[in-house]
Structure formats: structure tokens, C-alpha cells
Image (spheres, rainbow, N blue to C red):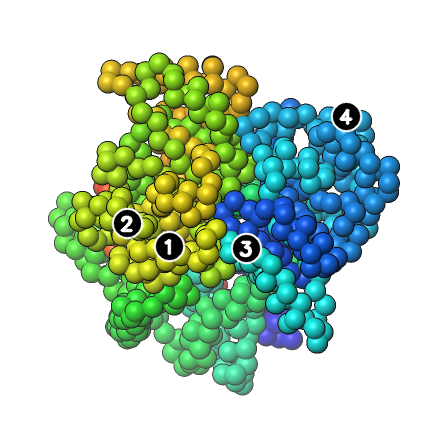
Amino acid sequence: MILTRSTLRQTLRHPLQWILAVIGVALGVAVVIGIDLANSSAERAFRLSAQTLSGSATHHIVGGPTGLDEKIYRRLRVDLGYRFSAPVVEGYANLKETDLPRTVRLLGVDPFAESPFRSYTSALEDSSAAGQLLTQSNSVFLTHSSARQMGRATGQTLTVETAGRTIELKILGTLAPRDQTTDAALADTIITDIATAQEVLAQIGRLSRIELIIDDDANTADTLSAIEAILPPTASLVHASARSETMAQMTRAFQLNLTALSLLALVVGMFLIYNTMTFSVLRRRTQLGILRTLGVTRRHIFLLVLGEALTVGAAGSILGVLLGYALGHGLLGLVTRTINDLYFVLNVRDLTLSPWSLTKGLVLGLGATLAAAVVPSLEATRSQARAVMARSALESRHRHRLVPLVSIMGAALLATGAGSLALPGKSLLVGFGALFVLISGYALVVPVLMIALMKGLQNLFNPFAGVLGRMALRAPLASLSRTGVATAALVVAVAATVGVGIMINSFRLTVDQWLNSFLRADIYITAAGGDFEEQRAPLPQEVIDQISSTEGVEKVTHARHLRMEAGDEPFELFVAEIPRESFDGYWFADGARKEIRQEFDRTTAVIVSEPFAYHRDLKRGDVLEMQTMQGPVSFRIAGVFTDYSSDRGRVTIRRDLFEHYWGDPGSDALGLYLKPGEDAEAVAETLRRHAAVDHQILVYSNRALRKSSLATFDRTFAITGVLRLLAVIVAFVGILSALMAMQIERSRELGILRALGLTPRQLWIMVSTETGLMGLIAGLLALPLGIIQALVLILVINRRSFGWTMQTAITGDILWQAIVLAVGAAVLAGIYPAWRMARSAPALALREE
């Protein structure tokens, strides 16, 4: 009880110090929880949507790049006699007449086969409802919640844009799912019959999949074999969970990257906890010595200090959970938008409060606090009853004994991290683990580097710095036990901005150069629609003819973007006509471009993107097997090219080769090469006015497409910028905490200076100079660590996450901005302590406690 009252008295005497520590932990925990909640909400929404749409299906029959021929369903039901099957046509459309762009899912089903699969479509079994769906064109049903969100009622219409057309859909009625989870999963879903979905999505005669219910019994193997026997070469039978798991895996590398970046804020918060607890021990050293004299054991002292830290950690963690929930709402939109830009369409409106995420945040907060408080707690047990050590002696011991020991540990961690990165492998967790080891090691050597830099600054400025200047130059080293930790926290935070900034800048520069080289046509045209880049509906032939005959157009190339799978891993099959001038824009990993082109043009060879080759351990000269309409065919890989459009990978095949093996001549994209002297923007505007009158198409000039691509790139990294800012805010709190501690501890010293004639203005200048020096030191020391982080992110993390090889571009603006950021954060953090010191009365400061 006495020890507890002593702790409470110390807390009440210096409340701001503890408040800052709580805020530091809270911010670190909030960032981790916010990211985790946003990630888990997006993943849960996807899984609920996939499970709800699949219903009770155990298996799916899926087709090749153009889907399934609907005749397969007839053979399954009639020839094979398998009744537990249902066809599905699924696609996306843009909902018009709304304030914000909105993508909706169109789900086409067979009302007479739905009963065993989806409970929410039971209303469609009614003869009148089924009859209306089958007899009224473009008729649809909505769930109650979807109708409410879209502001529509029975009898009204929805205007959607898909497959290059604008279509009016009539709402026949609403469906009522049995539970709120199903209702939420069906948000933005429009349900119709197979024929309407095929017409709206321009998939006449095609199905997206056929769903099956296959009981797990003794006849399962025979049933599967019988079904597989009637499937064409391009179709395959897969477990229902396999497709959703494959789609979920696509986003895991992205989500892991966000989680790792969020942990940086918590790491910076650990420095703040360490600094606060160290100062608490040093300030109470006399008191702790007296307690030891009165019989308090080292164990009790250790538990006392550790208990204080746990109290701070618990308060900060609880506050962090609340802040993290609020932060998660803001981050959810950024996470969802990035998934939509890079992977697949996903609508998430509600943040799911996951008990696991909250528990993880609390455990991380308390664990980080304990880890940071162990050393100060052990330090407290060394308090001696006799001859309480002077502050100068403590700092001397810290500098001459602890700093060398910590520096050796830091050097060992740096060597360990570098060695881990040098080992071969593709593990992303190992890469991030090595990165955190490097960061930790560098943070431990910051104090010794700080001593070296401060000595250099003293030698440089002492001759003309004046008395106040020399005092300011000595102050950070005089309180190294605290300024070293605060500076290390700022170094880690600023280094994160440098590392991520260099990575983003390098990536953006690489993508910009790649676009300039890769995009050789003057104008690009695609079919409009809400679907992702793959599986767009082909452009009508009359539109292609009209575009080809447009004045100023010299040559038109055709392309098709299709989705395929190899070993349950999806990739894009890019069917293209590649003229010589466009082929010259490809960047190949190895091999002469001329030889690659000859093999690509004259043989049954393909070229594959770098991510495709990296994730599948393929190289030039290897063989890739793909399922075609003529059965499995082996294609030789003529070359591996650089591509940043997708991390899933792309296989590019000649158009005539695709038509031969798949028999599909359609095109969903065109590349227009203009006659010399023609203005691409003017011709593009002409095409928008005329070719898009009856058909919705997207027309981009070369310059506009590059601009649009870079805008998408910037959106995907918006959330990274938020995380960098939050890490700096946590470091700012750490610097403020350290300066407040210095202000309290140096009250007697500053009181003597005031008594000797130092004015408040001079005191303000001296303290501001000290904080500015700490910021300058932190900024300079952050540069090497930031560059190391950038190299790891570029050469290891991004390579293992996405399979991309990027150029490294270290520009001067990022480096000097980091120094300005560090100095600015330190100076701003020093304003309040400087103000407090300048206002303190010398008599009160000199009074003995």
C-alpha cells in the first residue's frame, strides 16, 4: 500500500509525463488495430459474399478464359441426370444516376434449380415471380437492404452501364434474406434470370460457372469422375472453397505489408515507454534508495516499476482500442479502394469489430510496454541506500558502460538482419523480420552515433557559438540517457518516411518510364463496364469497323483480356496483336529482343510477365501448359517481360494463336496508330462524340492513359502516406515527453542560470537550440536507416510480395525533406517545454525538495 501511494504521488506531481506515455502507447496500438480491423473487415466481407453467393454448393464447374458453354449444363442435367446442379452468370455493372460511382454485382440464376442452393432466392420459386423473370426482359429482383440503399422500390427502374451499353432494369420485387449477415453480404447485388444476365453482360450462350451439391459419401469419387468425364478440356471441377481461397490469397501480401508498416508506429511507441520509465527511475533514485534502506527488496522495487509501466500500457492499450476502431473506419475506405484498383471488386461499408483484432491490439500494447520497461525496472533495483549517485555520475556510467554494450548488441543485430536478407528464399515474413531486426539494431547504435555527431558539431561551432550556444551543444550529451532514446524514436519514425518515400518514388518513376516505353499506340479504346480489367465483354464488330474508318487512323491492333488459372492461381491471358514498334517497348529480363520477337511471331511461344515467372519459378525457355479448346497444350516461354499492371501475372499470346486453340475472335480493346501529323487528343475527342453514341466505350489518348494509370498508382499508396504520418506523430509525442522530462530534471540548473542573470528570452533560445540540434541529429541519422529500409523494401519485400523488379531512385528532395521534418518535429515539440522553463521562477526552482 505504501509503495502504491508513493507511485500515485509521483504520478500526480508530473501528470503530463504519464499522459504523454499513455498517448504514445495508444497511438501505436491504434494504428495496429485500425489496419487490422480494416484488413479483417475487407477479408470477412469478401468471404461472406463468396459464401452467400455460393450458398450450399460444395463444388463448382468453371470454364476457361471465356467461361462455360451453356450446353454443358444440359448435358449435366439431361444426359448425366445429375439434378443437384444450378447455372450461374455473374458480372459487374456501373450503377448510374447516383452521386458517387458505384459498382453492383449482377447475379443470373435459374429459378427452377435454385431451391437447394440459396435460401434467399426461395421467393423466385413462386410461379408468378419465375414467370415474370422469364417473360419480362431486363427484369430483376433486389434484397430489401439493396433496394433501400439504392433508393428504389418495386416497379421502378435501375440504370446500369455494362458491356459497352447503358441498360434499364425493371425491379419486379424484393427478396428478404433470413438473417442480417446474408443481407449484408448481398448489398449491391442484383438478381435476375440466366437469359437476362447473359444479355446484359453480353455473354450469350455462356455461363460463369455451374454449382453442384455433391454429398460426401461412398459414391463421391464415382460422382466426381462421372461429371469430369463429360466436361470439355477447358472446364474443370473444383471445390467451392478453392476459388474463394484463391481470391483471398491475392490480397494477403498487400495486407501483410500494411500490417508491417503499422507495427512501426508501435515500435516508436516502445521508445517512448522506455524513455518515460527510465526518467521515472532516475528522478526517483533517491526515493528508491531510501525504500531499500527501509527494507524494501529488489524484487518489490522491480515489481513496483514494472507495475507502473503496466498501468501505463493498460491505459494506453484501452485508449488505443477506442482510437483504433475510429481509425479503422477511415482506413477501411482506403484499403477497399486499393483492393478494387489492384485485385477485384469489393464493396465494404461496415467495419467489423473483431474480438481477435482487439485482443491482439491489447496484447501487443501490453507486450511492447513490458519489453520497454524491463531495462528501467532492472535499473531501479540497483538503487543504493548509501550515497545516492549524482546525475553526472549516472550519465557517465550510461555513456561509458551502457552505450558501448548497447552499440555492440546493435551491431550484432545489424549483422543478423543483413545475413537473413542474404539467404535465398521467398518468405515475406522472413523479409519483414529481417527488416525489423535491422531497424532495432540501428536504433541501438543511435546513441554512439549521436555522440560522434555532437562531438563533430561542438568542434565545428564552439569557437563562435558563444556561451549559450556551447551550453546548447553540450546539453543533449549531458542527458544522453533520455535524449538518446528520444532521438532514436525520431530516427526510426523519420527513417520510415525516408524508406517508404524512396520506395514509392522509385516505384512511381519506374512505372512512369515503363508506361512511356510500353504504351506505343496513340489512342487506346476499351469496352466500358464495372468489371475488373479481365473478362470484359467484346466490342461489337460495328463499333470496331466505325473506329477503324475514322479519319486520321492508320492502323488498328486488337487485344483481349481474359482470366485463366494455372495450378489454382489466377492470371491474365492477354491476347494481342503486337506491331514491331510496340514490341520494341517491352523490357525483357534476359535474351535479345530480336530473338524473342522472332520466336514469339513464328512459333507457338508466349511471353510472360515478371510476376508470373517469379511466383511460378519459370524462366525463358521453360514450357507453360494451358488448357485450350483442343485440350492441354504446351507453350514455350520466349521471354520474361517487365509488367506493373498486375502482381498476379500476365501471359501474352498472339491473337492468331489464340484463335487457333480457343476459337474466339473477339476483342475488348483496340490500339490506334494515327497517321503522321494527327493530333491524338483531337481524334480521341472525335471518337468519344461519334463512336460512343450507341455504345459505351472508354477512349484514352496515350497521354491520358498514362495520367490515369499514375493516378491509380497514387491512390494505392495513399494509405501508406497515412501510416507514415502516424508514425511521425508518435515520435513527436516521444520527443515532447523527453523534453518535458529534461525540463523537470533541469529545474535547479535552470534556476541557477536565471539567478545569475539569464533572461527568459535567452533561456528560450537556448532550449530551442537544444531541441533543434536533437532534430538535426535525428534527421541526419535517419538518412542511412531510411536508405537501408528503401533498399530492403525495393529489392526484397516488393520482390517477394508482388514479383516486381524496380529501379532505385534516391532523390535529394526526399532526403532534405526528412531533415526538415525531423528538425521541425523537434522544434515544435520543444515549444511548450521552453515556454515552461522560461516562465519558471528561480526561487521555486532552487528550493530543495
Residue 402 marker:
none
Determine which quarter of the picture holds residue 79.
bottom right
Residue 820's place in the image compared with 558, above or below, is below
Considering the numbered disc 1 on the image, is that residue within a helix, a strand or a loop? helix
Residue 43's place in the image compared with 420, above or below, is above
Q: Inspect the image, locate mark 4, and give the three-letter code of the amino acid beneath it.
A: Gln
| Residue in the image at 40% along x and 36% along y | 559
| Residue in the image at 77% along x and 35% along y | 133
Rendered location of residue 236, percent (x, y)? 55, 58
Q: Which residue is mark 2?
A: 603
Q: Which residue is mark 4?
A: 156
Residue 612 marker:
1
Alpha carbon separation for disc pair 4 and 1? 46 Å
The first of marks 2 and 4 along the sequence is 4
Crowdedness of circle 4 by 10 Å Cα count: few (<14), some, many (20+)? few
Q: Which residue is mark 3?
A: 232
Residue 816 left/right relative to 325: left
Rendered location of residue 655, percent (x, y)? 37, 40
Q: Inspect the image, locate mark 2, and give the three-letter code of the amino acid beneath it.
A: Thr
Outermost residue, front side: 79
